[in-house]
Amino acid sequence: MWGMIATWRMAVEGITKGAKLLKEQKGAGDAIETAIREVEDFPYYKSVGYGGLPNEEMEVEMDAAYMDGDTLDIGAVCAIKDFANPVSIARRLSREKVNSFLAAEGAEKFAHKEGFERKNMLTDRAKAHYRKRVKETAAQEIRPYAGHDTVGMVCLDMSGKMTAATSTSGLFMKKKGRIGDSPVSGSGFYADSRRGAASATGLGEDLMKGCISYEIVRLMGEGMHPQKACETVVNYLDAQLKERRGQAGDLSLIAMNPQGEWGVATNIEGFSFAVVTEKQEPTVYLVTRTEDGHCTFETASEEWMENYMKTRMAPIEE
Ligand code: ASP
């Protein structure tokens, strides 16, 4: 059995490429890196890699991570600027015994020395979004806004190896140096080939309060189906946050177990995800959350898919 599952519709081209490698018996490391690079390279996705939206100083600072579920190696970068593929830098770092999680200039120095491709990640389109946002919020204080979509992915290859990886430009208009859950082990991602793997998207500050990806893997390790594990953990954290703090930020999770069974859960409307397995062609699903906290999903229609691309590529009226 092999498979990949990832947050948001934007991952579907990536997992399609990844699946091709998995079918050729390539490893879960190469498949997941290839898949995430595809999302990083596409200029119209506003929250990952090239074309990602900037922080409040108009700089694109990115977070990314990679985890090998066989060895439990982890590599991560945070607040890194001007490199084309943060996920590849994270994967390279995962092979280091120490210094495997690097921030800002330190991460950039490492990437430079290792010969990773430099690229100005701030596009004209992202600048236009920035200017528009500044205008819109001129009357109020500038603050991170809720529109965000990290790519978080997990992968299982034919040999039974699992991996997890993330890549994001984080929250639009975040403070310089702000780091979310995506590069943080246990929160944004976790992979253990013996128990399963999970990854998150949503409000990093709240996702980190529950070490949410690790919790899902832990429950899968106790034999819980990924769907039940995702719902149990998301609903629990959502309820705790609401009870103790009056509100909960966006929490959306995807997971897969070593048998290739998968699950998702969210506390928002409008979450989408992409999945491919040995038994299933690459598919985008839209999630609906029922009153009692269950998640149901349906395949995205062609019309929805077309509309999605149209809105992503529409001119920006400033
Ligand atoms: N979790 C990410 C962060 O807080 C944002 C996202 O998922 O889009 O940086």
Image (cartoon, rainbow, N blue to C red):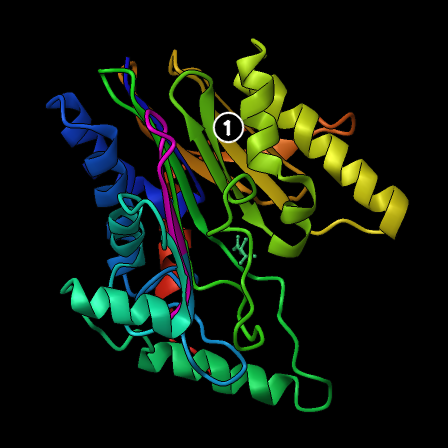
Q: Is disc 1 placed on a helix, strand or loop?
A: strand
Above or below for 141 versus 283: below
Q: Is residue 83 left or right of residue 117?
A: right
Quadrant housing residue 110:
bottom left
**Which residue lies at the image location 15% right of the left edge and 30% below the top edge?**
21
**Which residue lies at the image location 36% right of the left edge and 50% below the top edge?**
98
| Residue at numbered disc 1 | 298
Q: Is mark 1 within 8 Å of ligand 1?
A: no
**Which residue lies at the image location 30% right of the left edge and 73% below the top edge?**
121
Q: Residue furthest left?
A: 24
Q: Nearer the viewer, residue 129 or 90?
A: 90
Q: Nearer the viewer, residue 162 or 247?
A: 162
Q: Is residue 104 magenta?
A: no
**Which residue lies at the image location 28% right of the left edge and 37% below the top edge?**
15
**Amino acid beneath label 1:** Glu
Quadrant housing residue 299:
top left
Tell me which segment is drawn in magenta.
64-80
Residue 83 visible in the picture: no
Q: Quadrant of the N terminus?
A: top left
Quadrant housing residue 223:
top right
